[in-house]
Image (spheres, rainbow, N blue to C red):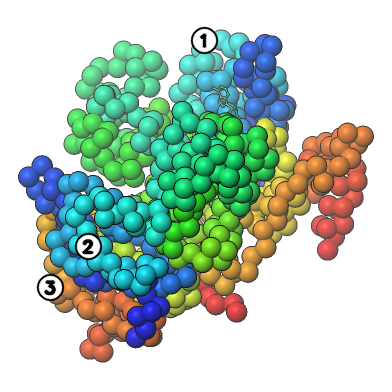
Amino acid sequence: MEQKNDVILSVKNLNVKFNLRGKVLHAIRGVTLDVHRGESLAIVGESGSGKSVLNKNFIGLLDPNGFISEGEIMYYGMENGEPQLLSGYKKDREWLKIRGKEVSMIMQDPMTSLNPLKTIGKQIGEAVEKHQGFKGARLKEEVLQILRDVGIEDPERRYKQYPHEFSGGMRQRVVIAIAVACRPKILICDEPTTALDVTIQAQILKLLKELKERLNLTIIFITHDLGVVANIADRVAVMYAGDIIEIGMVREVFYNPQHPYTWALLSSLPQLGIKGEDLYAIQGTPPNLFKEVVGDAFAPRNPQALAIDFVEQPPYFDVSPTHRARTWLLDPRAPKVDPPACLKKIQPSL
Amino acid sequence: MEAKKENREVLLSVRDLEVTFGSRRNPFKAVKGVSFDIYKGETFGLVGESGSGKTTIGRAIMRIHPTSGGEVIYKGEKINGKISKELDKKVISEIQMIFQDPMASLNERAKVDYIIAEGTYSTKKDLPKKERMELVDNSLLDVGLLPEFASRFPHEFSGGQRQRIGIARALIMEPNFIIADEPISALDVSIRAQVLNLMSKLQRERDLTYLFIAHDLSVMRFISDRIAVIHKGVIVELAECEKLFEHPLHPYTQSLLSALPLADPDKEKNKELIVYHPDECHFDYADNPPEWVEIEEGHFILANARELEEYRAQLQK
Ligand SMILES: Nc1ncnc2c1ncn2[C@@H]1O[C@H](COP(=O)(O)OP(=O)(O)OP(=O)(O)O)[C@@H](O)[C@H]1O
Ligand SMILES: Nc1ncnc2c1ncn2[C@@H]1O[C@H](COP(=O)(O)OP(=O)(O)OP(=O)(O)O)[C@@H](O)[C@H]1O
Ligand SMILES: [Mg+2]
Ligand SMILES: [Mg+2]
């Protein structure tokens, strides 16, 4: 197992629920996850699988109708070495020492994360001032440097402009600049490139990788684009219906996937399709999280599900020291089921 | 596909199309003289970065935006500019558009039956209510939704279902030609395959022709027969899909392809991004302007004499 000093954030059996019009929605169902210092971890899964909700717990931004019903989150990144029980934080004041300084998050909707009425320079300046206390000329110099750091040309002119004068890609650079302005240790990126073109997306990914090296960041990257995962991630966690059903090094998950949901996700890529034939499409819909899920949550959509999948939730089985999956197929007693043939098209080439 | 090549019938022909926005004193040309043909029954892909003019071209064909130059010819008749009432009616029913964002493109206050039937109120004005509702039920079934859904509101549906409603709304008009503007970009991965399969099935069954607009190249490669690459309102390259992916010639096409994210970590971590610098590549355009040339059969490129020579040499290899 990993040594503790490698782990910056540790999640144990996390359960998150929402109160919604008298009913309870069980959004995160027992997530256990260690995030390693300096890694880039991608979290993938379809819409509603709980990617955003899981991560909002790490900076105390869970919506007010949500609560942790069970489990804990520990943060080990403080300068003074004191572990922080994030799941025990009650007051906003406690979060102030974490948010921005320790953990920073780029939210899913890039348009809402900038204030349209303030200049770019002022917005970055406020973040820097709040955390580093710089003022006046010193502050401006710092902001210009940050703009340069995220690859914005002519920062003197850009400093005075408003968000609407920036293209989508440039705006996303500014959002990233604000997020790293206080030198956080963990940067959570929630779908930062979904709204962007491929060329701009590639540039933003490159920027994030550079910043990660330069600032010693740990990155958690939420996306549903498997191409982006292949590009940026060291490790991948696949979420389904509020749980991580498979996690491993990126090469392990792409070249040797184990869970039928991971198979299905990969198989539906147009990249693997044969022209003129139908693409593999996952049937049905994810489970209703207002009801308690029984067994393997993916079973009703899995044509090859085993009888036990409908009865009992599978435990994690280790595939390697770094790779594990929650599927009964890995139980020694299970019948042998081969992954879909089209997955052979994704092969290691190194 | 290949066998039909010789006698392919051109359904839509766009010649030197220009679309200009803004005022007379401050005009902005969003589409700067593009030309292409779309054959009956094919899927013609249009790719390019955000703001390059893809939607504008689609809307100009649909007659939503006026054109400021060039011609759009559908089944041999010019359909841009001033046209007769009958022709306008024909265009309205035969050419349909599926929109970019299924969340924003449906009228939230109308029920699904009205949304789907809307177009028929102008083309089939006097249709009895019962028959109109039958048409609605049939088009819901065509896209794999239940007729019971007709009395619901759009917000009660998932993204994939909404996009199906958008497709049903186009199908009810019995179109020949569908302009699909990023029909799956806003959808979740797991639903994208369903919608793509549905579109292919409908194409096979009804001999539909698609103009498919997207910026996701792996989707384009899967679905398109031919692809045109557009950059800042100008088409720079056009070729059969596989040819374009195997032998991209124009530096902008190369940069687009190099950025395509592949779900394969070994390939992805070693890929080289090619950045497009128009000023460097095309330094001599002022003295030696480019032209739209068919460099080999079915493969068009925007290039000047110097570049053509280089591209020809590349094709020899
Ligand atoms: N404030 C809330 N109240 C009630 N339910 C919520 C709330 N926020 C999220 N949920 C529910 O929790 C589940 C997980 O949502 P989450 O936003 O984490 O999904 P996601 O994986 O980020 O999806 P996407 O890819 O669409 O962003 C969903 O079923 C969602 O409807
Ligand atoms: N109604 C309009 N009025 C003024 N300018 C417009 C209008 N519609 C589009 N434009 C401009 O025309 C150019 C082309 O826009 P268009 O929407 O066609 O791009 P696109 O290629 O579809 O981009 P995307 O991939 O982002 O959808 C852009 O610069 C845009 O700002
Ligand atoms: Mg989310
Ligand atoms: Mg568009």
Q: Which is more toward the observer, A153 or A84?
A: A84
The disc numbered 3 marks a residue on which chain? A
Q: Quadrant of residue A15?
A: bottom left
Q: Which is more toward the observer, A287 or B142?
A: A287
- The answer for how far apart the CA atoms under marks 3 and 1 are is 64 Å
Nearer mark to the viewer, of 2 and 1: 2
The disc numbered 2 marks a residue on which chain? A
Residue A87 marker? 2
Q: Which amino acid does label 2 sit on?
A: Ser
SS at circle 3: loop
- Give whichever of discs 2 and 3 has the lower sequence position: 2
The residue singled out by tag 1 in the image is B85
Few, some or many residues within 10 Å of mark 3 (<14, 14–19, 20+): few
Q: Is residue A116 visible?
A: yes
> Which residue is located at x 61 percent, y 49 percent?
A145
Asked if the residues shown at circle 2 and circle 3 are in contact, with their CB atoms under 8 angstroms apart, the answer is no
Q: Quadrant of residue B287?
A: top right
> Which residue is located at x 26 percent, y 40 percent?
B157
Nearer mark to the viewer, of 3 and 1: 3
Residue A152 marker? none
